Image: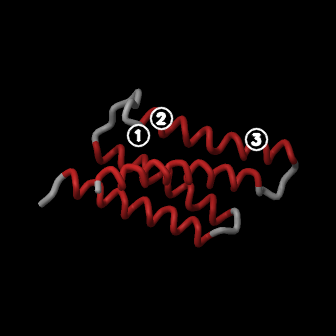
Amino acid sequence: MKAVLLTLAFLLELALLAAAGWWGFHLDAGLPVRLLAGIGAPLLIAVVWGVFCSPRAAVQLPAPAKYAVQAACFGAGGLLLAFAGRPLAGTVLVVLWAVNNALLRLLANPA
């Protein structure tokens, strides 16, 4: 079960990056701005995730702070999808992350 949840977590992280890119490439702006946003937004999220949330993170945060950074990243991804005209997809992304994260924490610390 844990392997399935960890796989889903990884796929959701990829979906988060795709959501940020989708938003950037679908902006109502000129090509240079769309390219910058479409590449820059996922890159920024990937850097934040790598520094604070990855298993080999450069900055080791306590668990509540790590979850807060993850929630901020997924919240931003959900908002970006909503801004790109896909509010349902943004909501699904955030809800799936929250449920998956809760299940992973329950498996790690069963009552």
Residue 32's spot in the image, x, y percent?
84, 42
- Secondary structure category for the residue under label 2: helix
Instruction: Please name the amino acid that badge 1 sits on.
Output: Cys
What amino acid is found at the position of numbered circle 3 in the picture? Leu
Residue 50 is labelled as 2
Which color scheme is applied? secondary structure
Q: Which mark is residue 35?
A: none
Residue 64's place in the image compared with 106, above or below, is above
Quarter that holds the C terminus: bottom left
Q: Label 1: which residue?
A: 53
Question: How far is disc 1 from disc 2 in space, using C-alphas?
Answer: 6 Å
Number of numbered labels in the structure image: 3
Q: Quadrant of the N terminus?
A: bottom left
Determine whether the residue tagged by mark 1 lies in a helix, strand or loop: loop
Left of 109 or right of it: where is 93? right
Sequence-earlier tag: 2 or 3:
3
Instruction: Sort mark 2 into few (<14), some (14-19) or many (20+) by Cα contacts within 10 Å.
Output: some
Pointer 1 with pointer 2, Cβ within 8 A: yes
Q: In the picture provided, is 73 more to the left or to the right than 43?
A: left
- Mark 3 or mark 1: which comes first in sequence? 3
Q: Which mark is residue 36?
A: 3
Alpha carbon of mark 2 to alpha carbon of mark 3: how far? 20 Å
